[in-house]
Amino acid sequence: MQHYAVEPTWRSSSYSSGNGQCVEVRDDRPGSVPVRDSKTPARPHLSFQADAWSAFIGAVRAEQL
């Protein structure tokens, strides 16, 4: 049986603007949310607990209302 390395799939956050100032996230890590800067994808990323990330996004949404 052969095993192939699968590159993680990063996506632009829905809160990123279209001016190159993007935050990318991954959805494939149950319980955590890896986050990186799209301008420097080879650099290390940050990883947040899923509930902490949800609280952060909730606070951002509340500020935008």
Image: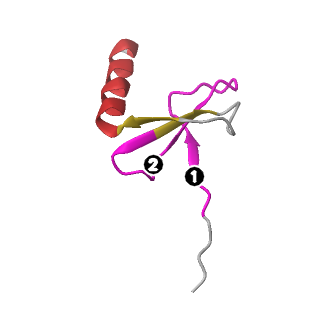
Quadrant where the C terminus is found in the figure: top left
Whether residue 4 is in magenta: the answer is no
Q: Amino acid at mark 1?
A: Thr
The residue lying at 57 percent from left, 43 percent from top is 11
| Image quarter of the N terminus | bottom right
Q: Main secondary structure of the magenta part?
A: loop
Q: Residue at x 48, y 40 (%)?
A: 34
Q: Which residues are magenta?
A: 6-33
Its colouring scheme is secondary structure
Q: Which residue is mark 1?
A: 9
Mark 2, secondary structure of its residue: loop
- Where does the image place residue 42, in percent across and percent down from the top left? 69, 39
Q: Which residue is mark 2?
A: 27
In contact (CB < 8 Å): disc 1 and disc 2:
yes
> What's the distance in space between the residues labelled 1 and 2, CA to CA?
8 Å
- Relative horizontal placement of residue 56, taking residue 26 as reference (left or right): left
* In the foreground, 17 or 4: 4
